[in-house]
Amino acid sequence: MKKWFAVIGNPISHSLSPFMHEKWLSELEIDASYIPIHVEEDNLEEAIMGLKLLGCSGWNVTVPYKEAIIPFLDDIDESAKGIGAVNTVVKTKDNRFIGYNTDGFGFIKSLGPINLEDNILIIGAGGAARGIVNAFKQGGFTNITIANRTAKNAEKMIHDLQIGHFITLNEAEAQLNSFDIVVQTTPQGMKNQANTLPIQLNKLKEHAIVADIVYNPLVTPFLEEATKYNARTINGLGMLVHQGAIAFSYWNGVYPKSEDMIDRLTENLGGNYVNR
Ligand code: ATR
């Protein structure tokens, strides 16, 4: 039977995953397809039974089902366990369905070469921050600081993941020159959200890496500000592409061309995704 893959979510029509995966499948001459499936909340269990029955070879999971899917899987990998969220389901040879989370590793890959000793500042303590911090931990990084508006949310994350320490946003601003990598994970700067900066960047270390997980717009006010201080800026498109590429490699045993895909999507999105 021809292989097929899917992404489930609600809404799903905006997802860039079908475009990416279809391109990679055809580039690598793999005879398979990848389809978006809109699933209503009440139908999640039936939808998953359907995917299994109809021979889906593996699927991605997006909002709002990354947590809700877990009870319907046979097991979850370490990458998903620490954060309680799955974005990729892999079917094993003996027909078991295992949940992984490739978001955090995808993010780390998008940074390019970095050192285990780098001092890392994460701004925010929501679901995305959890995935990233968990992946840094699994990757052997130890110097992790979390700055967040609400102390108790950051402290809960630090307690759950058993890594990192908390500072306030004001402390982050004041201590900014001690960080090699600064990661913005809050929704600020996203289309239809406040355009304020989570922290001021005037104490940014020369040549620091500054990443924003937002990719709509491609250049957030935070990244725009960071370029004024000669930072190497990274937008959220790299995370999107690499989380997909890692999932693709789990399913197909080969890592697809991610840099080309980042360039292609950047071009397709016209440098500014907001108005599309
Ligand atoms: P996700 O789960 O998708 O990562 P989220 O749960 O909306 O997104 O993440 C919200 C994170 O952004 C939280 O850390 C939140 O801070 P609080 O813990 O104080 O709520 C942070 N955040 C959201 N809006 C913010 C704002 N205007 N200023 C500062 N932090 C903000």
Image: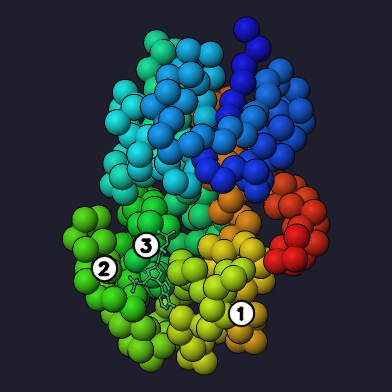
User: Which residue corresponds to mark 1?
Assistant: 221
Label 2 sits on a secondary structure element that is helix
Residue 220 can be seen in this image: yes
Q: Is residue 123 above or below residue 13?
A: below
Given the image, on which type of amino acid does mark 3 rest?
A: Gly
Say whether disc 1 or disc 2 marks the residue closer to the N-terminus: 2
**In the image, 76: left or right of 273?**
left
Q: Give the image quarter of residue 229.
A: bottom right
Marking on residue 25: none
**Would you name the residue on which mark 2 appears?**
153
Q: Secondary structure at mark 3?
A: loop
Q: Nearer the viewer, residue 153 or 51?
A: 51
Q: For disc 2, does the CB lie below 8 Å from ligand 1?
A: yes
Q: Which residue is mark 3?
A: 126
Ligand 1 neighbours mark 3 (CB distance < 8 Å): yes
- 272 w.r.t. 74: above or below: below
Q: Earlier in the sequence, mark 2 or mark 3?
A: 3
Give the residue type that dot 2 points to.
Asn
